[in-house]
Amino acid sequence: MKDSTHAIDAPTILVGVDLGLPHFDGELEELGLLAQTAGLRPVARITCKRKAPDAALFVGSGKADEIKALALLHGANEILFDQSLSPAQQRNLERHMGIPVNDRTLLILEIFAQRARSHEGKLQVELAKLQYLSTRLVRRWSHLERQSGGIGMRGGPGESQIELDRRMISESIKRTRERLEKVKRQRSTQRRQRQRRDAFAISLVGYTNAGKSTLFNALVKARAYAADQLFATLDTTTRQLYLGDKQGGGRSVSLSDTVGFIRDLPHGLIDAFQATLQEAADASLLMHVVDASNANFPEQMDEVYKVLADIGAADVPQVLVFNKLDTMREGTQPVSLHDHYDVDGQSVPRFFVSAKTGQGLSALREFLADKAMNNLPDDLTSGPVLD
């Protein structure tokens, strides 16, 4: 991928390296979903075990030969690693394979670039991609090895093209950051206005494809984009949630749908989306949406907690919403639709719902109305536990 863009429907080999970490996806299921979301077509998958990555090729020369043979066999024109590659590893692998080699980080950046709709979202993705590319200049283009200089050349005689490109990207990063800072100030002003109008704000958070946008639409009767795919929503949407006449006293509170999280979410994206994710850090209550039908939901929850800690939202009170009740396998159905779940030794309220069918939503609404009307008593404002 010499120009950092994927060919649509490109046949792709998926590669995973088991380094002994607990979250290793032996089936490369999530990487396959990410690839399909980006418009790629996985044609084969290969995994291997290593104690540590090979400094030059990440997988070692023998396994690299095996991957190359597999790519030739299937006519693949791209190889995709489930882990992050260093610039040198990426360059060496491309020379060894003879076709583009990319990693999970760039794949997620590509998906975000495709899905961003708002001006703010596009700026955030642009910044993250610029930061990523700034570390990849050593391998991207052959013309970077040439020296340029002389009369009329910017940068003075003898300055290399790579130095010029680095300066150009550095200036682009600076401009994009300044524009994002302006957007951040505007969003902060809007948030303060909402907070004056509504003392209670709820933010939806969760792993990507947990059904946050579907739940958001069901609760506020909105038409935010929702689909059974990864990162269907990137831009934060805020609507008024009516709490009902009986429990909510005819009152409404603000409900925000935020970008989904994922394992190994690039730090550049977390930094770039700080303005958007600030909605979660400033919320009165986090509604942590979990895909109850996914067997790996505990690991997905852990990833969400990591990101919440990164953005300063770890201590915001939470309620767990185990979604997709309608797709849970027989034998895994809950005994009760409302119970408590242990999170780091603390008991957090949990509701089982189906945002698609509406099952369990009335009890969740009553809970939210009760918390909003009580405006989070003092004993609930300092930690993640709600009883």
Image (tube, helix red, strand yellow):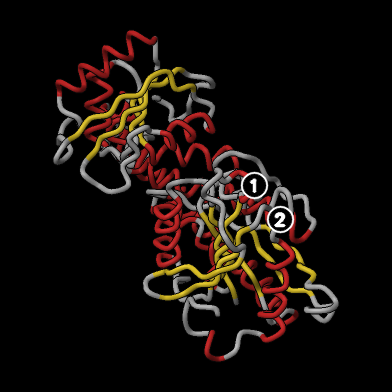
Q: Which residue is drawn at 32% across and 33% down?
A: 161
Disc number for residue 326: 1
Dot 2 corresponds to which residue? 359
Name the spot of residue 304 as percent of width and height, x first. 45, 58
Q: Residue at x 71, y 48 (%)?
A: 356
As shown in the figure, which amino acid type bears the numbered disc 2?
A: Gln
Which of these two is toward me, 199 or 158? 199
Q: Is residue 233 above or below residue 361?
A: above
Which of these two is toward me, 294 or 166? 294
How far separated are the C-alphas under marks 1 and 2? 8 Å
User: Dot 2, crowdedness within 10 Å: few (<14), some or many (≥20)?
Assistant: some
* Residue 279 appears in the rendering: no
- First along the sequence among labels 1 and 2: 1
User: Dot 1, crowdedness within 10 Å: few (<14), some or many (≥20)?
Assistant: some
| The quarter of the displayed image where residue 88 is located | top left
Task: Mark 1 and mark 2 in contact? Answer it, CB < 8 Å.
Answer: yes
Name the spot of residue 237 as percent of width and height, x first. 68, 58
Q: Quadrant of the N terminus?
A: top left
Disc number for residue 52: none
Left or right: residue 262 compared with residue 147: right
Name the spot of residue 247 as percent of width and height, x first. 78, 79
Q: Residue at x 67, y 74 (%)?
A: 367
Q: Which residue is drawn at 61% across and 59% down?
A: 352
Name the spot of residue 212 as percent of width and height, x first. 62, 54
Left or right: residue 77 compared with residue 111: left
Q: The residue tagged with tag 2: helix, strand or loop?
A: loop
| The quarter of the displayed image where residue 361 is located | bottom right
Residue that sits furthest to the bottom in the current view:
378
